[in-house]
Amino acid sequence: MRYLPLNENDRAAMLDVVGVDTVDDLFVDVPEAARLDKLIDLPTHMTEAEVDARLTAMAGKSRAAGDGPFFMGAGAYRHHIPASVDHLIQRSEFLTAYTPYQPEISQGTLQVLFEFQTQVAMLTGMDVANASMYDGSTACGEAVLMACRVKRRKKCVLAPGLHPHYAAVTENLCQYLDIDLDIHAPAPGKDVDVLDGLDKDVAAIVVQSPNVFGEIIDLEPYAEAAHAVGALLIAVFTEPVAFGAIKSPGEMGADIVVGEGQAIGVGLNFGGPYVGLFACRQKLVRQMPGRVCGETVDAEGKRGYVLTLSTREQHIRREKATSNICTNSGLCTVAFSIHMTLLGEAGLRQLAAINHKKACILADKLTAINGVELVTETFFNEFTLRLSKPATGVVGDMVEAGVLGGLHASRLMDGHDDLLIVCATETNSEADMDAFADALKGALS
Amino acid sequence: MKYTEDHEWIQLAKDGDSDIATIGVSAHAAEQLGDVVYVELPEVGAEFDKGDDAAVVESVKAASEIYAPLGGGITAVNEAWEDAPETVNAAPETDGWFFKMKITDSGELDGMMDADAYKTFLDSDD
Amino acid sequence: MSMNTQGRQTTPDAITVSEHETVSGNKGLAQSEKLIFEIGTPRRSGVDFPKLKGTKSRLGHMARTGKIGLPGLSEPEAMRHYVRLSQKNYAIDMGVYPLGSCTMKHNPRLNEKMARLPGFADLHPLQPRGTVQGALELMDELSHWICTLTGMPVVALSPKAGAHGELCGMMAIRAALDAKGAAHKRRVLVPESAHGTNPATAVLCGFSIDSIPANDAGRVDMAALRAKLGDAKEKNDVAGIMLTNPNTCGLFENDIIEIAELIHGAQGYFYCDGANFNALVGRVRPGDLGIDAMHLNLHKTFSTPHGGGGPGSGPTVLSEALAPFAPVPYVEKHKDGWRLVENADDKSFGRTSGTSFGRMTAFHGQMGMFTRALAYMLSHGSDGLKQATEDAVLNANYVQASLSGEMSPAFGGICMHEALFSDEFLEGTGVETLDFAKAMIDEDYHPMTMYFPLVVKGAMLIEPTESESKAELDRFIDVMNSLAKRAKAGDAEFFKAAPIYAPLRRLDETKAARTPVLRWRQDI
């Protein structure tokens, strides 16, 4: 077997040193009733070429996003990732290292994390960020728990523009903790509803911008309303590229900012692995969940980095930890950070501008079709259309025409089957957009 | 000064009619902690029963709860922690106090160890 | 106060500089590297974009006006920056990485290639199901392998990492108890030696923790367990047990079947932490041990890369009793192909039919890790997976036997996939476990896991994995024995100064935690 260096001579010699006759003697502690006497009924080993052929054939049964016109967003975004990003994250030193527990021989990962944390803090307009969470949805759930810890209150309000899967993940995480979640049913144009009825029991309000329908929300009134009752504003995002074009949540008074970083550096991957971003105000840092990297010096006084504030974490606090999280999104943070470094502020702004322009052009093309109405007045690279026919069928018909033309909102929420959530990025050509318009026209006629 | 088996010390003083206890950790406990980096203190006014978690003291590798050794309300916390958490290592049984509380039942002090008894307790613990 | 007996020096002693200082700060291939904020500028970029005609903005009044400050680098500058940084990392591909409980095994590159096939990697999670049949088939096949290897009926693929899988299993237990109306069962038994994630997870499910001690052989103290369940029968408040097997001392819990029976007898559930499943694959099926839930770490047992701390993946197998409560989404095969059950309230079809405890992540889990894990399973096959398990256990026992002369095995006897030592052999030498570990760095080894499990003083947990050859292990053993002799010979200074040859000397963790500097700022 190509991954196993020991041969039979090695094994015999080693068993001898251990002082046993056969390898079975190493499993004597296993109760007899549970010892397997034959191979488990699964296929036996395959060559590399065989595995390659089998999985390549399986992959061929799907229609990749890049195989044709593609306009989906709603929490996952298809952007061009520079080739150097994937090359760099496949370097053994990044790929095959563990969590940087030995800082003397992990400065590569640690410095990237320090740079990543700074990039995330800058992008979101916040003071500090952690070294990532599993994804945007779990970051959202953890933010709600954090707000309840900070405020010693047990209630949070989730706005109707929050991605329904984020609300579901948050609800799941809170369900056994006696936390009261006021989850507003998803609907476009209704985020303002959460401003009513806030009281001193509320630990935080959770508002997404751009929201799941693509609307850009001015977070300032939400921050003011939250602060007026002594609560926090948790700002959520799913498309970080937007912050190259719109105001950051930090500028508008958010206390905690969480979101999905996948759009930068990480591919679609059918939903994972992704990279959850988590940033907050300095004064909240000791309540922040997850790993965090900090600057220090070594014994010679040279600058270096270590994982720090680990007393918040499960391996020390055990049942009193801020979270049970152990793993972060390690390599995805490296990918995010490299892509962000290649972009720089100038590149990010250009990328954002192109995304927005493409989306505007697309919106114009699609709303010119009979039976199509734009629901979201403001948007970044994603917008919602109201169709004259149920969107589920329309999406299916467009697949037949070779176009992945957005997401029917009813896949994410109850009702709203006339809504189609559409995204355009720099990867969409003019021809793609025309194909989309033709397919939509055909499906509606 | 009295000591508990949880390695905390208590210094009692009178403030008018009230019994005010100052609470910290023993030099032995401070040494075991390693370099202290952060202390999370209770809010003034908070009420605790004997044995409740009242504060957390963190070193790089560990976090330890400080229990309220007596029942009562917090009247003051040591503001020095904010800037100088190392005080607990430097002067655990003087400047390194954590909080003061107005105790409800000074009878709870009965049976606690004095310095000599605590020393004997430590020796027998090893 | 609660006592900390594992305290150790976290501020290094000052040392004098003896090496020759270069003008640049570099030393041959040991290059110093500044932060991107110090070498890049916001105007520079390594990405080109086309010019696009202007259109009317739809941003409303929300356009960003202020500076962001993000520095950029051209592509060659960026390549250098990250390649230089990478060279300050130790990695499995460089040498022995014997972190106990972490399973640093070889990461096959075929896995990387497969995970990047567009039919898996370039799929949007919400594409219509007809367009993602290949991906759903892969998830279904991975599920089949996992269920068959574990002997369990059902697996939830969506948990994003080991601790997330624990949460999945414990939530399923909580949901099952709630469904039975057993609101009084809120106490979870956790051995002292457990991973810290176990108690943290149980608390997230609204449970309280009751610690069970280990016996002298490093396993669950059965008398103590019976006593705890004894009062459970009166109050009957035990929700279940969380037990790692093999346990964190690297030992198989030989009473495990009886433990399962006792827990079930008390109407509780058995959560098994599967972090060490790599010691069992192909030789033992957890399903035969009576467990109700167990997570797998695909990044440990099934070779997906650790990536400097993630991403992980924590599929969680569930017993028939817990299966109805599995999280959404999950894949089901139907006559017309594979479908995804996505809605926890869905009563129309699917094994949960409205009983699912909920959703754990925005989408379907770590697809990229699923592909890698399946590529690994197919490559090994059922015969190769069994051989890998045996080699891992043999390697650990070989290391334990070969080091026992100089070092102090914590329990002795046969171990599973990892060998645990205490710091007894260092007693009186002035050298501590931490110093010993740092000296290993100078010998070009990553240190083993230290000070864990907590039940062993100055613990050193060595997990060589099946990926090490005998020749590599012999070199490692030779170095470890030589270091142990050197410590005992009284050369404490040597150990206290280590590491000397790493990119940095020991770092001041106290300073980092006292005054946290978590980001770069212009002024600092």
Image (spheres, coloured by chain):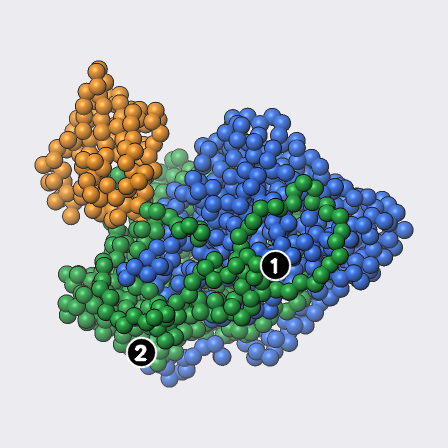
> What residue do we see at 51% from left, 68% from top?
C77
Residue C315 image point, x, y percent: 53, 57
**Residue nearest the viewer, comparing A84 with C299:** A84
Q: Which chain is orange?
A: B
Q: Residue at x 77, y 55 (%)?
A: A405
Residue A39 vertical position relative to residue A213 in the rendered view, above or below:
below
Locate residue C385, reporting x and y percent.
49, 71
- The residue nearer to you, when weighing A130 against A28, is A130
Q: Is residue A117 visible?
A: yes
Q: Which residue is mark 2?
A: C474
Chain shown blue: that is: A
Disc 2 packing (10 Å; few <14; some 14–19; many ≥20): some
| Circle 2: residue type | Asp
Q: Mark 1 and mark 2: span between their CA atoms?
A: 52 Å
Name the secondary structure under disc 2.
helix
The chain in green: C
Which mark is drawn over residue C440?
Answer: none
Where does label 1 land, which residue?
A347
Q: Is residue C433 left or right of residue C63?
A: left
